[in-house]
Image (cartoon, helix red, strand yellow):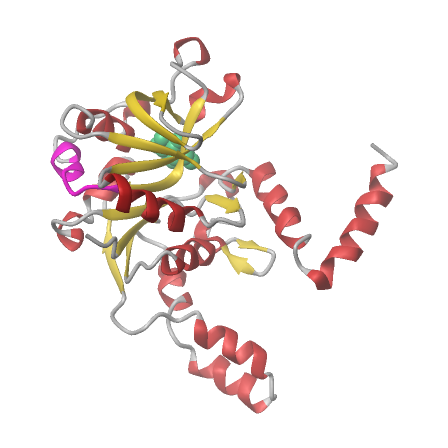
Amino acid sequence: MKIKKAVFPVAGLGTRFIPATKAMAKEMLPVVDKPLIQYAVEEAFDAGIEQIIFVTGRGKKALEDHFDRCFEVELTLQNKGKKDLLKQIQELVPKTGTIVYTRQNEPLGLGHAIWCARDIVGDEPFAVLLADDLIQTNKPVLTEMVKKFDRFRASIAAVMEVEKDQTDKYGILDASQLEKNIFRINDMVEKPAPKDAPSNLAIVGRYILTPTIFKHLGKKKTGAGGEIQLTDAMKSLLKEQPVFGYKFEGTRFDCGDKAGFQMANLAFALERPDMRDKLIHFIKEIQKDF
Ligand code: G1P
């Protein structure tokens, strides 16, 4: 069965980026010149996803407008002969009907956000992407995970090793390594204190889930932070189906964190030939003061 649908939980308020996010969706924060959400949506389409499901909330209208046509801008670019830009903004608009919006009308956590998409996803395996987790890689993570799904026919989470003192920021695994990049998950816990963490193998925001997850999310049990956690539902899923971890290649930036967001901007800007030299020169200059 092909993975055709991807769920993007985008209802979060982005309080860590206030004042920038007071009137603007945090997913619209740009890394270089592209909003965070666009990186994630492009990753999904590149992996063969056909339908994008945004679980959104109040104040997120800019997301809808971003993925829609804007004739005013198109006309202006056309009149000015800016063909490249025109092509760019036309290409980022997915085919009509491929984006579906639903709302999470209570901030009850990531697990609850995914559960809100249950009727749109239906009875098929699907992907989940957290736009905050931006990954710079030559092997796009979701594409790799779709390949792994074809092999294992089971739920998979992207994983990476984190510093031992950072476990309370992530879902942490107790897992057995099967191959170089593949783990079989035995247990998992959301945001454990370092002393309670079963390992330093953390979940990063890319998942492929079987629809059975909705049964577990539907129990609406609250966990860490008083929220309905996806990790808890996956832990419960483990009792009836295997769940795997895919250790991806590349660098993950936590764009929900101010420092992580700045690092992402620098790393992605350094990939751009038109900026690279200027930035390297600047870094060398300011480095002298460190
Ligand atoms: C969420 C998940 C957590 C995962 C993390 C990855 O946490 O609940 O298991 O490790 O994303 O970014 P959040 O960062 O939303 O608190």
Residue 288, quarter of the rendered image:
top right
Image position, residue 114 (x, y; %): 24, 43
Please tell me which residue is depicted at 39% across the width and 76% down the height of the picture.
69
Image position, residue 258 (x, y; %): 57, 39
Quarter of the C terminus within the rendering? top right
Foreground pick, 112 / 24? 112
Q: Is 287 situated above or below 59?
A: above
Please tell me which residue is depicted at 34% across the width and 48% down the height of the picture.
147
Image position, residue 206 (x, y; %): 37, 42
Judged left or right of residue 52, residue 287 is: right
Please tell me which residue is depicted at 25% across the width and 36% down the height of the picture.
111
Question: Image quadrant of ligand 1?
Answer: top left
Furthest residue to the top? 195
Tally of marks: 0
Foreground pick, 188 / 170? 188
Residue 139 on the magenta span:
no
Foreground pick, 245 / 50? 245
Furthest residue to the bottom? 79
Asked if residue 217 shows in the view, the reply is: yes
Residue 101, quarter of the rendered image:
bottom left
Image position, residue 81 (x, y; %): 60, 88
Foreground pick, 238 / 37? 238
Please tell me which residue is depicted at 38% across the width and 17% down the height of the picture.
192
Please state the extent of the stretch shown in magenta in the rendering.
Answer: 209-217
Judged left or right of residue 62, residue 231 is: left
Residue 52, quarter of the rendered image:
bottom left
Q: Is 154 situated above or below 63?
A: above
Asked if residue 11 shows in the view, the reply is: no
